[in-house]
Image: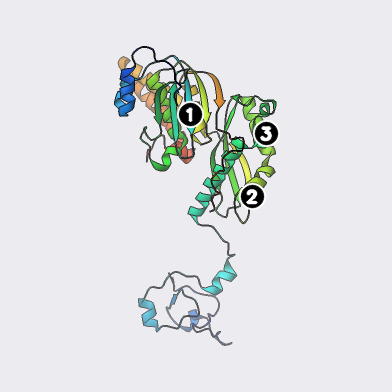
């Protein structure tokens, strides 16, 4: 969810790319930023990596599905690793802060890939949504 | 299946349930080549010609099963996989939500420093034995040496607690015994990948210089490839994309 920040400069190209949701135009028009925040959402079935600027505006996103994996292989650690590599290579970050959400197996692999790719990690935060006992969780799965 | 011509050391009961009479000779001396169909004793005796012709479904002879082997109940493969996956989910959920587990893995959480992490623990894989009694949990810790040691020690400390929690959350007849194992496959994989990348770079550099170094580089690459065989199935995906 992007915050309501007044837009500076012309970003029409990026917006059109996101609206059409075509990967190619996203790639071409993805801004290159040096400092940003990497959000890693690692669910049990997929890993989604979103790169934003420090204010939270999305620059680029990538997921295991867009990297060519399908069905159960999206959840594997290797998929998380490939996704992270893909995201960083497109954006070309130098310094980043990582926010991790969820507890899937792609989480660790993505972190390692980010650390290995030369991006300086300033800090790792865990932002898994935690209710202070709010909504009723779904019922238990019985096997 | 057919038991063909096996010399059976003791006299067999007749197919209609009668035990052989006291003076019965063993089949090897009594009659020449005989086909013994594998079927339970209760079925009506077929004439030998028909029995030889018709293939019978695989079933063990009852007298053989009780005397020769111990019957053990094994769960089906699919169920084992499903239970393992569910245990992985429950453990991951416990690591994120349960304060006891969080404090075991990351002692700083008790002081309040839980948002800026020094180490991150993930359940990489769960392997369950076929009889659902032993569960090996591969834990991967991201962080420095000290963080790893602290996390693994904390988890091993809480093994009984984890087992009781899993028993409460999942409906299983017998909760498996849980063993936490440090998962090194990630580091091994990333190390080997860095080596391979370095070799590729070197090879690309040397391609400009000469042909002779190529053989050397490819030999080293083959040695590294040999290391792959011992890795977990997860890492195989790096080379062989299914």
| x 55%, y 23%: residue | A124
| x 48%, y 53%: residue | B78
| x 43%, y 80%: residue | B32
Neighbor class of circle 1 (other Cα within 10 Å; few <14, some 14-19, many 20+) is: many
Query: Does the CB distance between marks 3 and 2 fall below 8 Å?
Result: no
Percent across and percent down for residue A60 are: 39, 23
Q: Please tell me whether residue A15 is drawn above or below residue B11 in the rendered image.
A: above
Marked residue chain, label 3: B
Q: CA distance from mark 3 to mark 2?
A: 19 Å
Neighbor class of circle 2 (other Cα within 10 Å; few <14, some 14-19, many 20+) is: some
Q: Secondary structure at mark 2?
A: helix
Neighbor class of circle 3 (other Cα within 10 Å; few <14, some 14-19, many 20+) is: many
Please tell me the numbered disc located at residue B104. 3
B50 left or right of B39? left
Marked residue chain, label 1: A
* Camera-nearest residue between B85 and A36: A36
Same-subunit check for callouts 1 and 3: no
Percent across and percent down for residue B11 are: 54, 80
| x 68%, y 39%: residue | B158
Percent across and percent down for residue A40 are: 48, 29
B238 left or right of B20? left
Marked residue chain, label 2: B
Can residue B9 be seen here?
yes
Q: Please tell me whether residue A85 is drawn above or below residue B227 in the rendered image.
A: above
Q: Pick whichever of labels 3 and 2 is earlier in the sequence.
A: 3
Can residue A22 be seen here?
no
Q: Please tell me whether residue A79 is drawn above or below residue A137 in the rendered image.
A: above
* Camera-nearest residue between B36 and B86: B86
Tag 2 residue: B167
* Camera-nearest residue between A140 and B236: A140
Tag 1 residue: A40
Q: Secondary structure at mark 3?
A: helix
């Amino acid at each position: 969810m992007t915050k309501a920040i007044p837009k500076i400069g012309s970003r029409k190209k990026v917006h059109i790319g996101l609206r059409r949701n075509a990967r190619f135009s996203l790639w071409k028009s993805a801004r290159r930023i040096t400092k940003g925040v990497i959000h890693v959402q690692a669910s049990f079935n997929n890993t989604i990596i979103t790169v934003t600027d420090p204010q939270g505006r999305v620059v680029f996103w990538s997921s295991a599905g867009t990297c060519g994996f399908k069905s159960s292989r999206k959840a594997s650690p290797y998929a998380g690793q490939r996704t992270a590599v893909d995201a960083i290579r497109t954006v070309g970050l130098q310094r980043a802060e990582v926010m991790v959400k969820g507890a899937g197996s792609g989480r660790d692999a993505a972190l390692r890939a980010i650390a290995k790719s030369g991006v300086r990690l300033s800090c790792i935060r865990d932002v898994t949504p935690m209710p202070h006992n709010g909504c009723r969780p779904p019922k238990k799965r019985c096997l | 299946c057919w038991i063909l011509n096996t010399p059976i050391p003791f006299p067999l009961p007749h197919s209609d349930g009668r035990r052989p009479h006291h003076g019965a000779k063993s089949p090897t001396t009594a009659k020449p080549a005989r086909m013994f169909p594998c079927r339970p004793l209760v079925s009506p005796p077929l004439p030998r010609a028909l029995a030889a012709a018709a293939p019978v479904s695989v079933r063990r002879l009852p007298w053989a099963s009780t005397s020769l082997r111990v019957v053990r109940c094994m769960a089906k493969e699919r169920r084992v996989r499903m239970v393992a996956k569910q245990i992985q989910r429950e453990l991951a959920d416990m690591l994120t939500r349960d304060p006891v587990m969080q404090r075991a893995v990351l002692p700083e959480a008790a002081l309040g420093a839980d948002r800026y992490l020094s180490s991150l623990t993930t359940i990489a894989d769960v392997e369950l034995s076929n009889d659902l009694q032993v569960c090996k949990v591969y834990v991967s810790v991201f962080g420095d040496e000290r963080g790893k040691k602290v996390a693994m020690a904390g988890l091993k400390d809480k093994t009984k607690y984890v087992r009781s929690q899993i028993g409460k959350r999942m409906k299983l007849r017998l909760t498996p015994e849980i063993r936490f194992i440090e998962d090194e496959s990630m580091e091994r994989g990333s190390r080997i990948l860095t080596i391979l990348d370095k070799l590729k770079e070197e090879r690309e550099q040397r391609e400009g210089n000469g042909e002779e170094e190529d053989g050397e580089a490819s030999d080293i690459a083959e040695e590294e490839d040999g290391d792959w065989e011992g890795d977990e199935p997860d890492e195989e995906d790096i080379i062989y994309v299914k």
